[in-house]
Amino acid sequence: EIVMTQSPLSLPVTPGEPASISCRSSQSLLHSNGYNYLEWYLQKPGQSPQLLIYLGSNRASGVPDRFSGSGSGTDFTLKISRVEAEDVGVYYCMQVLETHALSFGGGTKVEIK
Amino acid sequence: EVQLVESGGGLIQPGGSLRLSCAASGFSVSTNYMTWVRQAPGKGLEWVSIMYSGGTRYYADSMKGRFTISRDNSKNTLYLQMNSLRAEDTAVYYCARLPITVFGVVSLDPWGQGTLVTVSS
């Protein structure tokens, strides 16, 4: 099983300021096709998780361009260029390289200062 | 519109059984990978089970032998049969689709709204 580790656990942010979340996997998520099978999800308060980023750096449909994903292998980062109030919630990374045993990071709670 | 709607949750005693349903619309469950994910109160996301389009099924270790994922193509519905339920199975259970792309399956999208299962005496 691939273990996913996120940091920080909690991230107080100021609107308009940037924010960054780290995700590390216990095994490389780099597929032979050159893509990293790493996703980012946001779970807003009281809602189901929603897809933000797939294949490490591709924004899902409708996701604002202030969100960006980067990294390769075992180290990944989600960045928000300018945080808005609507961005609060819990962010999760997830690996889909091993579909027989999907796994999530523990989550990072983003809240407004 | 692509949509998933879960149902079947509720209060059940330890040792009991429950079957969750996930009705799909806007796509076919038989031609996609489908998965169940759960979230205990105040906790993070935990993967439960997956069913490939070809019918292959996998489970998280703590659910093996107790949970069974299945689908009814005629009803376009995914199921999760849960037996020998424990207090630690208390959670919101979400179903989600993993669309098959040229890169394989690369995301869970969409997710259902979830159904709450409470295991308590």
Image: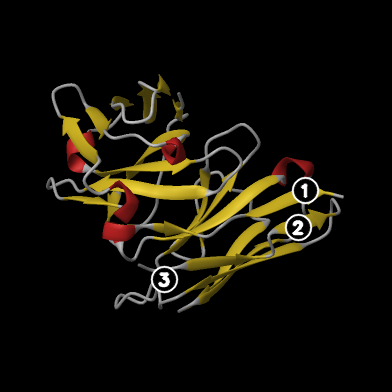
Residue shown at 39% from the left, 24% from the top: B13
Q: Residue B88 versus residue A31: which sits nearer the camera? A: B88
Pointer 1 chain: A
Residue B104 image-quadrant placement: bottom left
Pointer 3 chain: A
Amino acid carrying label 1: it is: Glu
Q: According to the image, label 3 marks what residue? A: A36
* First of labels 1, 2 by sequence position: 2
* First of labels 3, 1 by sequence position: 3
Q: Secondary structure at mark 2?
A: strand
Up/down of A91 relative to A43, above or below: below
Instruction: Please provide percent x and percent y for residue A85.
Output: 78, 42
Q: Are marks 2 and 3 in contact (CB under 8 Å)?
A: no
Residue B1 visible at all: no
Instruction: Please provide percent x and percent y for residue B103.
Output: 30, 62
Give a yes or no on whether discs 1 and 2 share a subunit: yes
Residue shown at 35% from the left, 21% from the top: B8
Amino acid carrying label 2: it is: Leu
Amino acid carrying label 3: it is: Asn
Q: According to the image, label 1 marks what residue? A: A111
Marks 3 and 1, how far apart at CA:
28 Å
Residue A31 image-quadrant placement: bottom left
* First of labels 2, 3 by sequence position: 2
